[in-house]
Image (cartoon, rainbow, N blue to C red):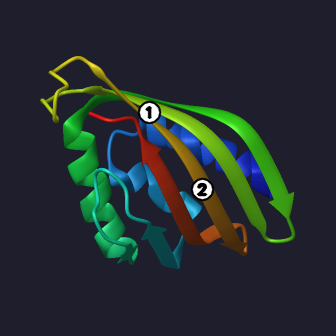
């Protein structure tokens, strides 16, 4: 499977995951995920696999469902860059949004691979005001 297809499958699995364990086949054991400041996170955050699990589980509790629409995808050597329109239906209120309403964001995500696994991921998440 080519790297672009792995990212597409990863996002599909992220959308349908039952637990973080569903994502483990995609991650290198030494994954480093970086989330740059956005409306949900006021500072740059760097996460290991253990910290990524905590953040993913916390985010899942906020959402009833989520959707990823890849707008553009670029592949260069061991890296894949995607531009994604993301939306999530809330399971709890957030800002001015109520339960059941949609939170929307525009993501640029950079994935670097080692042996077919994501070893580095950088997220630039631009949320609509909520």
Q: Give percent across and percent down for residue 110.
A: 64, 62
Examine the rendered structure and indicate whether residue 45 appears above or below residue 41: below
Q: Please indicate, yes or no, whether residue 90 appears anywhere in the rendered image.
A: yes
Say which element carries label 2: strand
**Which residue is nearer to you in this view: 57 or 84?**
84
**Which residue is nearer to you in this view: 116 or 32?**
32
Q: Give percent across and percent down for residue 38.
A: 37, 56
**Which residue is nearer to you in this view: 104 or 60?**
104
Q: How many neighbours does mark 1 have within 10 angstroms: few (below 14), some (14-19), or many (20 or more)?
A: few
Please tell me which residue is depicted at 49% across the width and 77% down the height of the picture: 32
Q: Give percent across and percent down for residue 90.
A: 24, 27
Which mark sits nearer the N-terminus, 2 or 1?
1
Examine the rendered structure and indicate whether residue 114 appears above or below residue 1: below
Residue with the mark numbered 2: 109
Q: Give percent across and percent down for residue 128.
A: 39, 35
**Which residue is nearer to you in this view: 30 or 67?**
67
Residue with the mark numbered 1: 16
Closer to us: mark 2 or mark 1? Answer: 2
In this rendering, would 99 be left or right of 38?
left
In this rendering, would 64 be left or right of 2?
left
Please tell me which residue is depicted at 32% across the width and 35% down the height of the picture: 129
Tell me how far mark 2 sits from mark 1, CA to CA.
Answer: 19 Å
Say which element carries label 1: helix
Q: Which mark is residue 122?
A: none
């Amino acid at each position: 499977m080519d790297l672009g297809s792995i990212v597409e499958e990863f996002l599909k699995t992220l959308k349908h995951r039952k637990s973080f364990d569903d994502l483990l086949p995609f991650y290198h054991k030494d994954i480093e995920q970086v989330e740059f400041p956005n409306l949900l996170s006021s500072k740059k955050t760097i996460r290991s696999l253990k910290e990524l699990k905590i953040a993913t589980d916390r985010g899942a509790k906020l959402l009833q469902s989520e959707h990823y629409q890849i707008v553009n995808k670029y592949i260069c050597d061991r890296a894949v860059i995607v531009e994604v329109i993301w939306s999530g239906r809330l399971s709890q209120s957030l800002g001015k949004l109520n339960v059941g309403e949609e939170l929307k964001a525009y993501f640029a995500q950079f994935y670097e691979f080692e042996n077919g696994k994501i070893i580095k991921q950088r997220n630039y998440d631009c949320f609509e005001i909520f």
